[in-house]
Image: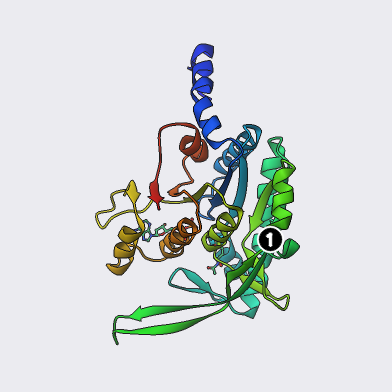
Amino acid sequence: MSPNLSVHDKAAILSEALPYMQQHDDSIIVIKYGGHAMGDEQVARDFARDIVLLEQAGINPVVVHGGGPQISEMLQRLGIKSEFAAGYRITDAASVEVVEMVLAGSINKQLVGFINAEGGRAVGLSGKDGRMVIAKKATRTIHDPDSAIEKVIDLGFVGEPDKVDTTVLDQIIRSDIIPVLAPVAASADGGTFNVNADTFAGAIAGALGATRLLLLTDVPGILDKDKNLITEIDVEGIRRLIADGTITGGMIPKVETCIYALERGVEAVVIMDGKVPHAVLLELMTNHGAGTLIRR
Ligand SMILES: Nc1ncnc2c1ncn2[C@@H]1O[C@H](COP(=O)(O)OP(=O)(O)O)[C@@H](O)[C@H]1O
Ligand SMILES: CC(=O)N[C@@H](CCC(=O)OP(=O)(O)O)C(=O)O
């Protein structure tokens, strides 16, 4: 905290947080922490501290992390080629092994370690644990501008959540333990599916009846054609921006997730810059309102 603030200023800041604590009391808030936002260790540690503060304030944070850039780096080190289509990694058998190692292994445990170092009690799981997420193979179509036809693309071992069982999560949340989830799911026969972390977070938020879903990324929110931040948008507006090519790449799974979560009862989704220190507190505990708000 700024050393220039007097103790009176600090007390006033704490006092101003009271209505926000009351508003979110006992609610479930799913926070997706993207791989791009995780780059700076201090920001990641600040993020972990914010999560512990939310838990301490009587809110139930559920963390879903990504790790796209970290997977790409590991695949490159291993000499495995990797390509994306419509924001999803085309995942072959060799890649899916690496995806699980990086997501459910190193990244998940790093984040659990940071939260626990701040005095929280975090438990790291992937969608495979406790039959939390069973996925089915995902397919996507892309518009081929040369032939002007829709092409179906095979994404390999990419899954989309089919069944979400919150039994284990419900128990963890009730015990004041912070779940930290890696977006890896089981197939019906116990195999492994790579699930986009935004998609995974949306499915979890919907199944848990979360009040909010925060998607922390590396841009201030959804940007318009002139790269200006759109502060608020509805589902129709999002569909227009996809159709006219303003929303592309990794932003596509994000906005698809927003639509999915809102349709399942989540009150509001916010896409925001996770590289801003204490982004989560700014959004939930002040009237600052960062990023793009998407409401039903
Ligand atoms: N209209 C848009 N507004 C903001 N970002 C966009 C837009 N269209 C595409 N993007 C891209 O989406 C990226 C965020 O998605 P992604 O790289 O998958 O992030 P994360 O790792 O946080 O999930 C941005 O860095 C930006 O390059
Ligand atoms: C199918 C698919 O694309 N899976 C993602 C999973 C990680 C992820 O989504 O990480 P970010 O949130 O950091 O982008 C991938 O392989 O990169």
Q: Is residue 37 above or below residue 83?
A: above
Point out residue 129 in the picture as x, y percentages from the top left corner: 73, 62
Q: Is ligand 2 within 8 Å of the beta carbon of the residue shown at mark 1?
A: no
Q: Residue furthest bottom?
A: 147
Query: What residue is shown at x 49% (from left), y 17% (from top)?
Result: 12
Residue located at (46% from left, 56% from top): 262
Q: Is residue 55 above or below residue 98?
A: above
Residue drawn at 49 percent across, 57 percent down: 261
Circle 1 residues within 10 Å: few <14, some 14–19, many ≥20? many
The foreground one among 278 and 269 is 269
Q: On the image, numbered disc 1 is attached to which residue?
A: 126
Image position of 69 with respect to 117: above or below: below
In the rendered image, the vertical position of residue 236 relative to residue 149, given as above or below? above
- Residue 31 in percent (x, y) is at 55, 48
> Residue placed farthest to the left in the image?
226
Residue 238 placement, left or right of 104: left
**Corner quadrant of residue 194:** bottom right
Q: Secondary structure at mark 1?
A: strand
Image coordinates for residue 274, horizontal then vertical, percent: 49, 46
Observer able to see residue 108 = yes
Quadrant of the picture in which ligand 1 is shown = bottom left
Place of residue 169 in the rendered image (x, y in percent of width and height, measured from the top left): 70, 53
